Image (cartoon, rainbow, N blue to C red):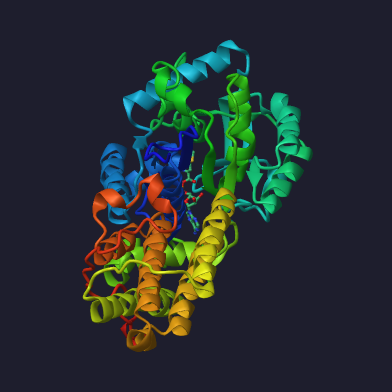
Amino acid sequence: METDKPLGKGSFYLTTPIYYVNDAPHIGHSYTTVAADALARYERLKGRDVFFLTGTDEHGQKIYRAAQACNETPETLVNQVVERYKCLWKNLFVSNDDFIRTTEPRHTRRVQKVFQRLCDKGDIYLGEYEGWYCTPCESFWTTGQLIEGKCPECSRTAERLKEVNYFFKLSKYRDKILQHIDRNPEFIQPESRRNELRNRLLAGVDDVSVSRQSLPWGIPVPMDPEHTIYVWIDALLNYITALGYDDEMERFNRYWPADVHLIGKEILWFHGAIWPAVLMALDLPLPKKVFAHGWWTIEGQKISKSLGNAIDPLKITEQYGVDAYRYFILREVPFGMDGNFSYTMLVHRINSDLGNDLGNLLMRSLTMIEKFSDGKIPSPQGTREEDINLTEGAARLETKLDEEMKALQFSQALETVWEFVAQTNKYIEESKPWVLAKKDKQALSTTLYNIAEALRLISIHISPFMPQTSREIFSQLGIPEEDRFQRSERTWGKLKPLTKTKKGKALFPRIEMSAQLA
Ligand code: ME8
């Protein structure tokens, strides 16, 4: 007997990077968070006990200087900018379970404890740092790593630094990390990034500086408060401090290790080398997967403050809608590759995939149900070969989607759903309900039922990506809230005949190219 209980496949913990609050969020930040949200919603749909964490990285030289530049205290700046992040996530329907700020006491006290423990263990020691520092990346570099005197990551000018610092024994863990990477091909994804990381580790690693001298904006080193803890150590620890490590262990024990850390490719070193080493030093298991996705450019150019081309995602969603934006960023580029944002492509996707394919499917289906069945979903009567094809298509869709979501191939997953949208449109063309209405009422009933049933399943499958559109389709089909997402509702044939449909407005009205923002 089927039950509506969750599948009980256990917990699923996923995270985004915690973003710097020196400046407002742009589409790059929204990309990782929306991808994480789609995954979180998908896993919840599967019955997993999901914990989805995002937050903000609020300490360090970069934020300190940003505050100075606008004559604010760092506290004022971070309190202002964090609201922009929170507001954006709300607007984008992001369903995070927690939001951690690194200035919160629950975080700072736990970071200090971890730092102390690593010192006690002998994995952190006092030394002298001489080298370079890139403030925008908050990264230490050796002379050999600089490219033409510039930061190899962001190509900006690095500063010479000579100061007494605490060091973490990264070198001690190098072989163990390499071994872990080799034994667990799923650990670092995609594969090309794993190879880059491996090569960098193989080339040899130095111990890393984990404190800054006389930088007033950070968490003080517990036994030496003249120093502040290096912002990257502070930040990485959010993934466990948010779970309560290590003074409220219930949540931690329930969710750690993380199933996936979603990050951008530029911060893989921190997540694929430094973070595993810290976890090893703490005798904690490593996250199951770190996925480093690619970068968005805007109309072909890197998103940067100096170019002034960063787009506020709220501007896009105001004009084009939240779900259209979510669909576009996840569909347009295979997860892992770089992509280019252009309004032309956005409008194209809205008009073709969302308007023509999905929106018209709903509209024409409900129009036919109104016209030929008095606005009520008829009972299916008999099964023809074309009906079997459609139900098989639905079953294939579910299996394929599972594989693609497991591999975090969001774009492919959406393509798979759209193959089924196309199959349903084709089913209508071939079944010709308008002809059946005149000569075969039984086949007409079956056909109209099947079309509505296909739409119901489409609505379930798009819900992780486009929650609002999913709700809209359900409500136009007349399906009450309680019948939408239970596990037993996911198989073909669960749509109740005689359901009264409520045709509403077009899901994605056509946008004329001339109405573009840009
Ligand atoms: O690095 N394309 O924060 P951050 C795609 N605080 N994704 C982009 C992007 C782009 N053009 N620009 C930013 C930090 N991102 C640290 C993280 S985690 C313990 C600490 C996304 O504000 C992408 O996820 O610079 C990238 O890794 C992240 O934002 C960097 O955000």
Residue lying furthest top in this view?
120
- The image position of residue 143, as x and y in percent, is 69, 44
Quarter of the figure that contains the N terminus:
top left
Does 502 sit left or right of 110 as displayed?
left
Count of labels in the image: 0
Q: Quadrant of residue 501?
A: bottom left
- Residue at left offset 67%, top offset 50%: 193
Where 381 falls versus 199 (above or below)?
A: below
- Residue at left offset 33%, top offset 61%: 470
Q: In which quarter of the image is residue 75?
A: top left
- Residue at left offset 78%, top offset 39%: 202
- The image position of residue 62, as x and y in percent, is 43, 44
Q: In which quarter of the image is residue 461?
A: bottom left
Where 224 falls versus 432 (above or below)?
A: above
Does 102 sit left or right of 9 as displayed?
left
Given residues 424 and 81, the one toward you in this image is: 424
- The image position of residue 449, as x and y in percent, is 36, 69
Given residues 398 and 227, the one toward you in this image is: 398
- Residue at left offset 51%, top offset 20%: 115
Quarter of the figure that contains the C terminus:
bottom left
- The image position of residue 253, as x and y in percent, is 47, 22
Mark yes or no: residue 462 visible: yes
Mark yes or no: residue 126 visible: no
Does 101 sit left or right of 258 as displayed?
left
Given residues 307 and 498, the one toward you in this image is: 498
